[in-house]
Amino acid sequence: MNVLVTGGTGYIGMRLVAALTSRGHSVRALVRPASAHRLPEHVVTVAGNALNAASVSSVAEASDTLVHLVGTPHPNPSKAEEFRRVDLESIRASVAAAKQRHIAHLVYVSVAHPAPAMQAYVAARVEGEAAVVEAGLTATILRPWYVLGPGHWWPVMLIPFYAIGELVPSTRESAWRLGLVSVAQMVRALVCAVESPPPTGTRRIIEVPEIRRAQPG
């Protein structure tokens, strides 16, 4: 498949482009010129600005699956302005480009919601989802809460509390929806999303329990 990735040099993106190319997909990564050297040689890099719809559109093709991974690194409540300037504007740019170029499938990493924390971050991602829906695109939306991996291990101390929450009927749904996933699970779920798009013109939502279970064929 032809896959265009924004955010391909990031925490999830680096691992995803490697996984996709290992499975025989043709992968292009939209990157800033200064970041191109960070990607494997067999990934085609295209210079551009993920916050600019015209820039994304200039490299998108109708046959593409566009995987949107752009986001503020290490999000925290102090970065509310950045969530709107980077996270929200980049998905709006990808949506506009996808609609203009009639791409086959948009894959968007959003966030689990509703949630009791990170309200500005959640709000930006929810607006991003709304933009995808309003555009009428064929799309898959993944909703992780926190992605564990190198440099992102601190929530493991919360695992006992998650276990208790899953046992209590009144908190079970929230514990599942806001559960932790590993970066390996996210990559597998994204590969599945790329390889198994929903019916044309429809949207599919993948929540935390499905992310954990995803296994590419």
Image: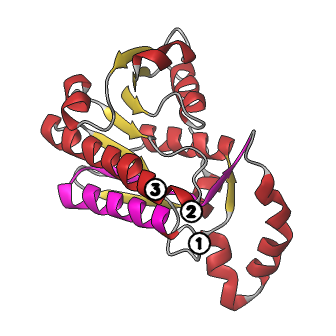
Q: Give above or below for 74 relative to 59.
A: below
Q: Mark 2 points at which residue?
A: 77
What is the CA distance from the residue labelled 1 to the residue labelled 3?
Answer: 15 Å
Tell me which amino acid carries mark 1: Ala
Tell me which amino acid carries mark 2: Pro
Which is nearer the eye, 115 or 103?
115
Check disc 3: other Cα within 10 Å, few if <14, some if 14-19, many if 20+: many
What is the CA distance from the residue labelled 2 to the residue labelled 3?
Answer: 17 Å
Q: Mark 1 points at which residue?
A: 117
Q: Give the range drawn in magenta.
A: 120-149
Quadrant showing the C terminus = top right
What is the CA distance from the residue labelled 1 to the residue labelled 2?
Answer: 9 Å
**Residue depicted at 67% across the width and 91% down the height:** 170
Q: Is residue 62 visible?
A: no
Q: Give above or below for 162 relative to 49.
A: below
Numbered mark located on residue 92 in the image: none
Residue 8 at x, y percent in the picture: 48, 29
Which is nearer the eye, 105 or 112?
112
Residue 74 at x, y percent in the picture: 61, 47
Do the residues bearing badges 1 and 2 touch, measured as CB atoms within 8 Å?
A: yes
Name the element at disc 3. Answer: loop
Which is nearer the eye, 121 or 204?
121
Check disc 1: other Cα within 10 Å, few if <14, some if 14-19, many if 20+: few
Q: Mark 3 points at which residue?
A: 110
Tell me which amino acid carries mark 3: Ser
Is 131 colored magenta in this rendering?
yes
* Marks 1, 2: nearer the viewer: 2
**Residue depicted at 23% across the width and 51% down the height:** 137
